[in-house]
Image (cartoon, coloured by chain):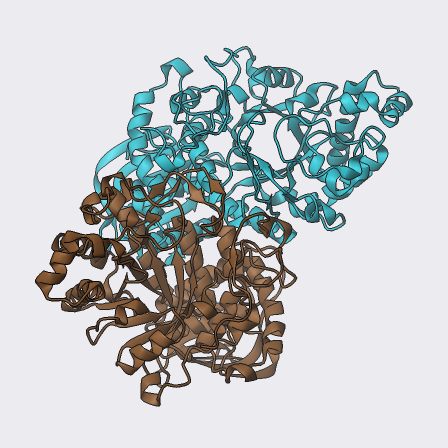
Chain colours: A brown, B cyan
Amino acid sequence: MTELIPAPRSVVAGSGEVRLTGRTRIRVGRGTEEVGDWLRTVLRQATGLPLPVGRDSGDADEESIALALSAGLGPEEYRLVSGPAGVRIEGGSAAGVLLGAQTLRQLLGPDAYRRAPVRRDRAWAVPHVTVEDGPRFRWRGLMLDVARHFMPKDGVLRYIDLMAAHKLNVLHLHLTDDQGWRIEIKRYPKLTEVGSWRARTKVGHRASPLWDDKPHGGHYTQDDIREIVAYAAERHISVVPEIDVPGHSQAAIAAYPELGNSDVVDTASLTVWDTWGINANVLAPTDDTLRFYEGVLEEVLDLFPADAGPFSPFVHIGGDECSKDQWRESDTAQKQISNLGLADEDALQAWFIGHFDSWLAARGRRLIGWDEILEGGLAPGAAVSSWRGYAGGVTAARAGHDVVMCPEQQVYLDHRQAAGPEEPVPIGYVRTLEDVYRFEPVPAELTAAERARVLGTQANVWTEVMEDQGRVDYQTFPRLAALAEVAWSDLPAPADRDFTDFERRMTAHYRRLDALGVGYRPPTGPLPWQQRPGILGRPIDGPPPAR
Amino acid sequence: MTELIPAPRSVVAGSGEVRLTGRTRIRVGRGTEEVGDWLRTVLRQATGLPLPVGRDSGDADEESIALALSAGLGPEEYRLVSGPAGVRIEGGSAAGVLLGAQTLRQLLGPDAYRRAPVRRDRAWAVPHVTVEDGPRFRWRGLMLDVARHFMPKDGVLRYIDLMAAHKLNVLHLHLTDDQGWRIEIKRYPKLTEVGSWRARTKVGHRASPLWDDKPHGGHYTQDDIREIVAYAAERHISVVPEIDVPGHSQAAIAAYPELGNSDVVDTASLTVWDTWGINANVLAPTDDTLRFYEGVLEEVLDLFPADAGPFSPFVHIGGDECSKDQWRESDTAQKQISNLGLADEDALQAWFIGHFDSWLAARGRRLIGWDEILEGGLAPGAAVSSWRGYAGGVTAARAGHDVVMCPEQQVYLDHRQAAGPEEPVPIGYVRTLEDVYRFEPVPAELTAAERARVLGTQANVWTEVMEDQGRVDYQTFPRLAALAEVAWSDLPAPADRDFTDFERRMTAHYRRLDALGVGYRPPTGPLPWQQRPGILGRPIDGPPPAR
């Protein structure tokens, strides 16, 4: 039981075990009914045991798994006691109880993650143990880029389950980009009719000569989105949608050419982008564009209700990597700068983002964007995803904004996991499992008050070179397990972290990932079919900058 | 409720409805506990209603869904009554009750197929109706070729759920072929280490000049297989494994060169095949090869227990398309012919298959193979998959063998669904939804006694040109819905079948497939990203031969 990932605050082992048998019951206290239901479903499918659910009487019962709320614990804190009185999981809220139930699943062994029993008449046991636990950070996230390569709905639901098993609680869905628009918007059907597919796709880095000539596309219907959001909420995961503006918008412009800078380029001839990089075709900074995206966001707010989870009020509006070239050439943009009395194109971007900042705030929602949105001032409630190193996060925290730390040098999981030539499509720095394990989300230079602004951290999975679930699994795992521990556990300073112990616990965890069917990178390197020989990447030599 | 697919024997509609509410209970009678559990899990996730499960008292209860066995019904027959006394589903066995529960799910509407509630406070209702139902055929199958393109475990579990929703009950898993070996065999680890991946893959028909230079591979561990078999068994689906011999074996020979005709070709230099077609590299017809495959099959029998379902005693040994060229040239093969006193190479193949026929029979199992195995005489218990038209099935039935009808001209779902140039990678005949709907599994020339030998039918999904789940979905659906109705419903002669009514019911069924996230072919033709322009297929013009 010392093989838990992420590591709990405190584990005190006993010497016996609680056997799960045909007589074992799940007993739920008030407010834990849904968790009990989830636990019963997953354990029932894995074990085949009947595990009936009943009311918790509060009495000791050696043949029960009791779930209860406890007023003395924080919302995501839990206490799991396995002993002569059975198993009891108490949490400060239903979320805490679910987190404890995830720990219980780990204690039962890898087969607890399977969807049907693989052996008849095997014994199931929870070792006697007391686990006291709670998270270091409130925001423990994964960003999935479903725009560059579409992930079908069942793949997203699978990732939600994988996140929950790792005690992660925020799924940031990157739904729109130059290469695809993935969410149905009823009033603008062409966003998906036109914007959700491309005729071909660059294979590898943009400098690669290779193309995949298969069309690629797909999108989530509004009901699919509702299903994803509800499925995540049941697992106490908030889904934060990203509608990326004003850059990364060629798919939208291909669908509605009037959204682009049509006085500079023939936007009517643009198609969904088929290669990678920073794109010059950005949104026209007009009032019409604002109205269009207000229409988009009205539907988004309906699909992602603010009360679905603690971070559900957030809407990510991107704001990254917006080329200003077309705005410099565009009479329309220049007139807008003049009419608004702005200094330059950067101020125009700030005006654009600021509009949605106010618009969202007026609707009780909070804007979050990539750290470029700091360039121009933000409403007090806005938050920042710090991706260009730590600097954006430091600036934001000092300015009183909440921050999610996801520096590209540390937790961009498209970056390669090893230096070897067999590593598939090598992008960026070498970021090993150990590197991610030693990632520290809180910039050292912050004061205590500023540190409180760090909501947490997330790993970002950009999918330019991940064409299917197998590639996403490979890049994401095992490193997401290290990120999960960084986000959850009270680890010491990076240099003092016990990576050897983490690796030891990973030995058990790989068996869990096997049972879950995750195509992770093995510690010995990629399997032959996980390699991508001959595809040009863009490796960066040497270590990343210190900060 | 007249929109059920497959069509039931009898539907009598009433005028009211049974509402599902927070007070609705599922009540299970003896022997229906597991079905109740399954039903509760799927309805709970889709509706969010608590739906507690309790014992069936036999009393009418307008707020319950009661499940019970009924001695008067055949094993897969069921009666579903929705009326003032609530919903009651009786079946001749647990399988029958599950089939009725699948009908209930259809009656609840498309959102009943989602994995989380998409609308809060919506009403759920079952119209008042009496459905009396049972299958025409006992064997209602789908063959998935996971050898040509590997389908990850979660994809297979997904297909099991899709099959169950269509009242199909046999999953024939084509686990080995020239292009890949997909099942872990402990005593022969190289079958998967070497045999489960290839360096590149032909794109399109073998005459196509295109290659996908990505390595492709993957396999199921033995625990994965156990999980698949158990998951299917819970849904009353038998999994029939296919280990294809003595042809279609280059992946095995690449792993263990001694399995090939090493006196004719340098088998040590063979790799897993990367293109399509009939392969000259077949197994050496030696006693050593028999011993090797006995070792394989010993593990297969352990992984696929005979008591997991009504068709679980069956083991498919392929037997198709075995080129005799190498055997003609091989001294070893010729000596074997001489030693065994056989007439020729065809008799040698019959000896080879006959060995496993006896070997399986001695272990209480039944051999099934492609219709080539008829050429040489079979043990009485052996069965035949009739794929080269109806002829093999006719011969087999007349010789007293059980038959599964799956003629390539009718139900090979790799064949194209329409004549249009936009149809992806056009292979074979045009086989529309209507064509499959009018497929008749029972050859007209059989006597009544011979007809009883037709166990049923299955669709075969060969995946040479289906590189991922999206392509498999596209080729399989909606045609599998038509095959399901052919296999289940008491349809009239092909010309008299009411395809217009089927299409009407499909309108509702497409919404179910949407909720399930199935990437089916829309009635209007492929979506842009479902197309595969520029990839050479091998269309055959005109209609298929009459028989």
Q: Position of residue B412 (x, y in %)?
A: 51, 26
> Residue at point 29% right, 35% down?
B508
Frontmost residue, B32 versus B342: B342
Q: Residue furthest bottom?
A: A448
Which sits in the foreground, B307 or B332?
A: B332
Percent x, y of residue A176: 31, 53
Question: Residue lying farthest left?
Answer: A339
User: Could you say where residue A267 lies in the image, as x and y percent from the top left?
Assistant: 24, 43
Viewer can see residue B21: no
- The quadrant of the picture occupied by the N terminus of chain B is top left
Above or below residue A542? Residue B211 is: above
Corner quadrant of residue B259: top right
Q: Is residue B431 visible?
A: yes
Q: Is residue B435 above or below residue A119?
A: above
Please give the name of the residue rendered at 78% of the width and 28% of the height, measured from the top-left corner: B352
The quadrant holding residue A399 is: bottom left
Residue farthest along the front direction in this orientation:
A329
Q: How many badges with numbers are in the image?
A: 0
Tell whether A419 sits left or right of B341: left
x, y percentage for residue A55?
Answer: 38, 71
Of residues B105 and A294, the one drawn nearer to the viewer in this rendering: A294
In-front residue for pair A318/B220: A318
Would you say A225 lies left or right of B152 here?
left
